[in-house]
Amino acid sequence: MRRGDRRDTSLTLFTPVLRAAGPLREVEETWEWERRALRFCCLIAVPGLNGRPFLRYHRGMAKRNSTRRSTKRSSRPSPKNAPGKRRGPPAKQAGAKQAGAEPQAERLQKVLAAAGLGSRRACEELITTGRVEIDRQVVTELGTRVDPRRQEVRVDGEPLAQPKLVCYAVNKPTGVVSTNRDPQRRPRVIDLLPSEDGRRLFPVGRLDLNSEGLILVTNDGDLANQLTHPRYGVAKTYRVQVAGRPGREVLAQLRRGVRLAEGIAKAESVKVRSHHKQSTVLEMVLREGRNREIRRMLAAVEHKVMRLVRVAVGPVRLGELAPGKFRRLDRKELAALRKAATMPSARSENRHV
């Protein structure tokens, strides 16, 4: 269809309306109504000098289309405005600004975690509940940045202290809980350590009430977050005594994965350490930290756990540490632990691919 034909068709559609309007004066009086009725059309009827209508392109539509075209043109990258193509004085000014810029402030929850107030998630709860102040102003917004060297941070009205970061290896006996808050007031892991210098210590991860072995206790929130984050998958080694004698197929199933309520749980490795009359001692390596994971995995393959001892967390081993005792990690152990906690595991990398 030609352009003229399209205009004739539109004119044919609008002519009955204009004819019903009467003479030119009446058409001019009803023009406002016509304009509103046809505001969504590109072509609208306009009364001419002799009272006969003619077609005109809608100005609003033309303006809208021109705006869209200009937006599309402006969204295209321009080589002149590209970040890497700047030359001359603007680049020098930017460089001078970076050279004289002050160090960036850190997120508030990171500062609280580094001060030993708990994990970042626990520190976020402190912020959202209105227990944190910056320069005497209550802050409840997550992501707020602060410079602890120039700003005063308070938690529950007390100034935020910057204690020295420490990390202990503790041999947790059975009957001791690994949480800091226990309504039943049972023995806690942190009760096995001396409280000195006002340091707020907390366990890294958990061992259930009937499990025993190595558990790390620290006031370094960043280190605790890295050791427990699924992305890094720090290996944890357990020595498990189970009822019966698991066969090769059972061990292979534990490596392939066992379906639990929250998904598939698998062991990095499973080895048989020794056999007894009615039990078997296994060595299992896991990179996840689900609640009672080993006990539920072995229950799924019909082998009850009789004793569960964690013997290593990454490069840190339990060794000859007696139950209920602790020792402070040296610099080499801390360096090896931080290195293990900053290397993403192969399983987590495959999961994100």
Image: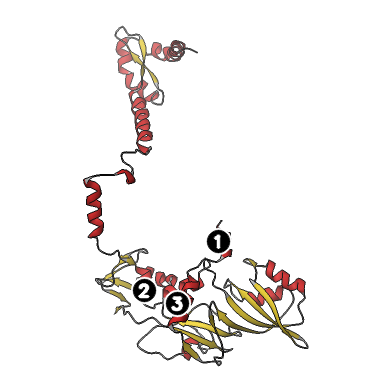
Locate residue 87 relative to residue 337 in the image: left or right: left
Horizontal and vertical percent position of residue 171: 54, 88
Sooner in the amino-acid sequence: mark 2 or mark 3: 2
What amino acid is labelled 1 in the image? Glu
Sooner in the amino-acid sequence: mark 2 or mark 1: 2
Say few, some or many: other residues with alpha carbon within 10 Å of mark 2 (under 14 / 14 to 19 / 20 or more): many
Sooner in the amino-acid sequence: mark 1 or mark 3: 3
Q: Please tell me whether mark 2 or mark 3 is closer to you in this view.
A: 3
Horizontal and vertical percent position of residue 304: 71, 80
Which residue is disc 3 drawn over?
335
- Label 2 – label 1 distance at C-alpha: 29 Å
State whether residue 48 appears in this view.
yes
Which residue is disc 1 drawn over?
349
Locate residue 142 relative to residue 346 in the image: left or right: left
Horizontal and vertical percent position of residue 5: 46, 11
Which residue is disc 2 drawn over?
112
Residue at (30% x, 15% y) in the render: 28
Q: Please tell me whether mark 1 or mark 3 is closer to you in this view.
A: 3
Among the 4 quarters of the image, the one containing residue 145: bottom left
- Label 1 – label 3 distance at C-alpha: 23 Å
Q: Secondary structure at mark 2?
A: helix
